[in-house]
Image (cartoon, grey):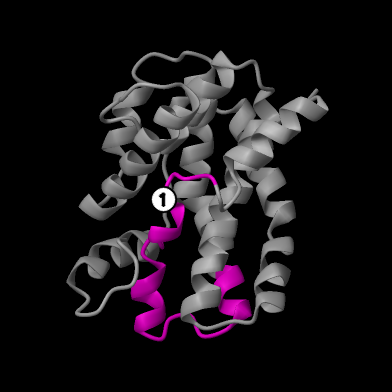
């Protein structure tokens, strides 16, 4: 069970102010919004719920758990699961920044969820709370991107995030019982969006 000290650290790690550069990435969301695929809060909530259940959210949670538990080959496999160059950049840039801030030193080719898993284990943080906080931060960052780019009001954005709490809990619980053999997904539109983003004429976000 998490202590108050643990919660302080997790809140700091996944706050918008923690300098891993999360604000620069939209996970392909910018491309979808540019094409008119998401125009309101309902569409955003549906999109993020699918990513959590069937896409990178679910897989990242499994990778984080595996890294925390010291599962062999998780580092290499997490790199291989990125469907595009931009998604690889997104996760490795944040992973390197997170590792430098929390553990010190420089690590290349370390994805964000794996870096979090290793650091949480090294610092004795409880696994369930770490996974939940990671997924919350992932969703909060994408909601923030949509608030700026759809645009949505901040109140609408926070309502979308609150509406994802139950899904985050389900994905977290499933990841704690999963193994690397359970990896996979079918959030194909999100994967395609990350590829289409590379060719946008005007871009605010790096991915």
Apparent side of residue 93 relative to residue 17 in the rendered image (left or right): left
The answer to whether residue 172 shows anywhere in this view is no
Give the vertical position of 113 relative to 67 (above or below). Answer: below
Residue 7 appears at what percent x and percent y? 74, 33
Q: Nearer the viewer, residue 92 or 53?
A: 92
Quarter of the figure that contains the N terminus: top right
Numbered range of the magenta stretch: 18-46
Q: Which residue is mark 1?
A: 21
Q: In the image, what residue occupies the spot 71% across and 45% down?
A: 169
Secondary structure type for disc 1: loop
How many marks on residues? Answer: 1
Q: Nearer the viewer, residue 188 or 90?
A: 90
Residue 40 image-quadrant placement: bottom right
Q: Quick check: is 52 in the magenta stretch?
A: no
Residue 20 appears at what percent x and percent y? 44, 44
The answer to whether residue 95 shows anywhere in this view is yes
Residue 204 appears at what percent x and percent y? 33, 72
Q: In the image, what residue occupies the spot 36% across and 82% down?
A: 34
Q: In the image, what residue occupies the spot 40% across and 29% down?
A: 100
Residue 22 appears at what percent x and percent y? 45, 52
Q: Nearer the viewer, residue 181 or 114?
A: 114
Q: Quick check: is 37 in the magenta stretch?
A: yes
Give the vertical position of 152 relative to 106 (above or below). Answer: below
Residue 2 image-quadrant placement: top right
Give the vertical position of 102 relative to 69 (above or below). Answer: below
Quarter of the figure that contains the C terminus: bottom left
Mark 1 is surrounded, within 10 Å at the Cα level, by few (under 14), some (14 to 19) or many (20 or more) other residues, namely: some
Apparent side of residue 39 relative to residue 172 in the rendered image (left or right): left
Q: In the image, what residue occupies the spot 38% across and 72% down?
A: 30
């Amino acid at each position: 069970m998490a202590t108050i000290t643990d919660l302080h650290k997790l809140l700091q790690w996944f706050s918008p102010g923690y300098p891993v550069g999360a604000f620069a990435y939209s996970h392909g969301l910018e491309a979808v919004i540019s094409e008119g695929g998401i125009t309101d809060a309902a569409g955003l909530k549906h999109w993020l719920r699918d990513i959590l259940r069937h896409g990178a959210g679910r897989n990242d949670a499994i990778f984080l758990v595996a890294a925390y538990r010291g599962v062999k080959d998780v580092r290499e496999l997490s790199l291989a699961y990125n469907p595009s160059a931009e998604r690889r950049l997104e996760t490795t840039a944040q992973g390197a920044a997170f590792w430098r801030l929390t553990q010190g030193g420089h690590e290349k080719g370390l994805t964000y969820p794996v870096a979090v898993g290793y650091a949480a284990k090294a610092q004795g943080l409880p696994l369930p709370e770490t996974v939940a906080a990671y997924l919350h931060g992932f969703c909060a960052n994408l909601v923030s991107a949509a608030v700026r780019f759809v645009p949505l009001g901040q109140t609408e954005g926070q309502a979308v995030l609150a509406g994802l709490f139950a899904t985050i809990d389900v994905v977290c619980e499933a990841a704690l019982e999963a193994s690397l053999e359970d990896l996979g997904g079918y959030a194909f539109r999100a994967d395609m969006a990350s590829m289409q983003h590379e060719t946008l004429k005007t871009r605010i976000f790096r991915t």
